């Protein structure tokens, strides 16, 4: 979906009423659906500037995909999930890509996906694979795409949520809990480095998390 008000509201300094005014000035070129999308996004508190996507990052099981669906619905913005994008491109699951091509090849696909999304332009909700922000290049690309949100989660919550999960190749280990703790120790500083907003998700429902995000982006 092309976002109609990108030019109109590209000045990030304007206040929300200013954006509405500017959008209205340009509304003659828009269809009703487009105008409704713009208004919903403004009401949701998102400044519709160039590259103003909301990007959800965080560890496996932090709730990125579920929250992405809800945010997309709430903001009337399209949702793009990088894992699903890659799976569609490759015609197989992430687990199959890991088995067939190895982790490094998958990481290259993630970077390639980010470049493609950036070149596509537009504003959307983007949920990302848990390891995506680990590459420096990816962190720079995320910053180009919009507001990066880090969903911080405790290891206990991840263990609880992913108990019995067989879809994550990185957790197919003898001691998945130990691996979760190890990966979180390495990764948390990098998620934080990449993010503009950090939200602790443990013990909160999706509505609460969504409100926290929308207050801060
Ligand atoms: C990974 C997380 C997965 C998926 C892949 C690798 C990771 O996505 O991209 O299995 O390195 O943390 P989710 O975070 O959606 O589970």
Image: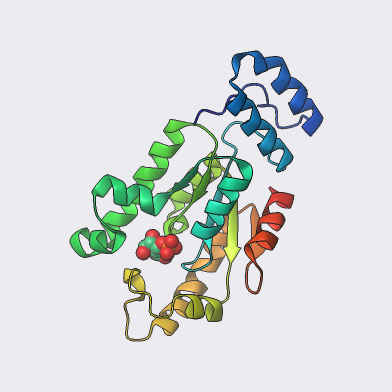
Q: Is residue 66 left or right of residue 36?
A: left
Rendering coords of residue 129 (x, y %)? 43, 58
Give the image location of residue 130, x and y in percent.
Answer: 45, 62
Residue at the extreme top of the image, as rendered: 28
At x 48%, y 71%, the residue is 186
| Color encoding of the figure | rainbow
**Does residue 6 appear anywhere in the picture?**
no
Q: Who is closer to the viewer here, 193 or 6?
A: 6
Q: Residue at x 61, y 24 (%)?
A: 32
Question: Which residue is at a point 25% across and 58% down the rendered structure image?
Answer: 97
Q: How many marks?
A: 0
Q: Quadrant of ligand 1?
A: bottom left
Residue at the far front: name it: 32
Q: Looking at the rendering, which quadrant does residue 209 occupy?
A: bottom right
Q: Position of residue 115 (x, y in %)?
A: 40, 39
Task: Locate residue 181, reporting x and y percent.
Answer: 48, 79
In this rendering, the answer to whether 176 lies above or below 149 is below
Q: Residue at x 58, y 59 (%)?
A: 150
Q: Is residue 214 visible?
A: yes
**In the image, residue 116 above or below residue 111:** above
Viewer-side residue, 44 vs 32: 32
């Amino acid at each position: 979906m092309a976002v109609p008000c990108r030019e109109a509201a590209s000045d990030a300094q304007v206040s929300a009423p200013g954006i509405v005014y500017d959008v209205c000035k340009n509304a003659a070129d828009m269809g009703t659906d487009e105008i409704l999308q713009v208004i919903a996004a403004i009401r949701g508190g998102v400044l519709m500037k160039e590259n103003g996507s909301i990007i959800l990052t965080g560890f496996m099981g932090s709730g990125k995909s579920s929250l992405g669906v809800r945010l997309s619905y709430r903001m009337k913005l399209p949702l793009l999930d990088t894992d699903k994008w890659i799976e569609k491109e490759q015609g197989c699951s992430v687990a199959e890509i890991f088995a067939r091509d190895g982790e490094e090849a998958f990481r290259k696909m993630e970077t390639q996906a980010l470049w493609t999304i950036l070149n596509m332009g537009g504003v959307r909700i983007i949920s990302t694979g848990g390891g995506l922000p680990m590459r420096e290049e990816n962190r720079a690309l995320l910053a180009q795409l919009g507001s990066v949100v880090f969903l911080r989660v405790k290891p206990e919550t991840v263990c609880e949520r992913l108990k019995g999960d067989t879809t994550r190749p990185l957790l197919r280990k003898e001691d998945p809990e130990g691996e979760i703790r190890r990966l979180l120790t390495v990764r948390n500083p990098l998620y934080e480095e990449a993010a503009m907003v950090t939200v602790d998700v443990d013990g909160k429902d999706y509505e609460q998390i969504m409100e926290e995000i929308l207050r801060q982006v």
